[in-house]
Amino acid sequence: MKPHVSDFERGRAVVRILVVVAVVCGLCALLFTQENSREQMYLVLASFACVIAVIVVARIMCICPHCGKRIVSGVLVLKVCPKCKHSLITGEKIKSKR
Ligand SMILES: [Zn+2]
């Protein structure tokens, strides 16, 4: 693992994986299981568990490395902290574009 990877970047990677797993579980529950079957219930529960895990991981790990602001919305797309305008990956100041 590279030493310069920030907690934010690691958290985002975990969130991304969990979102994919949640979607896959949800889709499998809808498409590949019989309605009200035990398998469907397990997949729906797994999907919910992943959604909850996403919220928990985002709250704990997705924090701006510069100002400590928690980034919850837009965690997968933001590159710059909306509060202090520092990079969420490196913590460096982003020069404003002209
Ligand atoms: Zn910040």
Image (cartoon, rainbow, N blue to C red):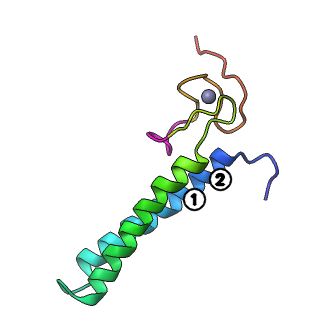
Q: Quadrant of residue 29?
A: bottom left
Contact? badges 2 and 1 (CB < 8 Å): yes
As measured in the structure, the alpha-carbon distance from the residue carrying label 2 to the one carrying label 1 is 6 Å
What is the residue that sits farthest to the left in this orientation? 35
Instruction: Look at the numbered disc 1 and give the secondary structure of its residue.
Output: helix
Q: Is residue 64 above or below residue 8?
A: above
Q: Tell me which amino acid carries mark 1.
A: Val
Residue in the picture at 58% in, 10% down: 98
Q: Which mark is residue 14?
A: 1
Disc 2 target residue: 10
Q: Main secondary structure of the magenta part?
A: loop
Residue in the picture at 41% in, 68% down: 49
Instruction: Look at the numbered disc 2 and give the secondary structure of its residue.
Output: helix
- Report the front residue among 4 and 58: 58
Q: Is mark 2 within 8 Å of ligand 1?
A: no
* Image spot of residue 77 (x, y percent): 49, 41
Q: Tell me which amino acid carries mark 2.
A: Arg
Please check the rendered image and state whether residue 75 is part of the magenta-colored stretch, yes or no: yes
- Report the front residue among 8 and 52: 52
What is the residue that sits farthest to the top in this orientation? 98
Residue in the picture at 47% in, 41% down: 72
* Image spot of residue 64 (x, y percent): 62, 35
**First to last magenta residue range:** 72-78
* Image spot of residue 60 (x, y percent): 58, 49
Q: Quadrant of residue 32?
A: bottom left
Q: Which quadrant of the frame does ligand 1 lie within?
A: top right
Image quadrant for the N terminus?
bottom right
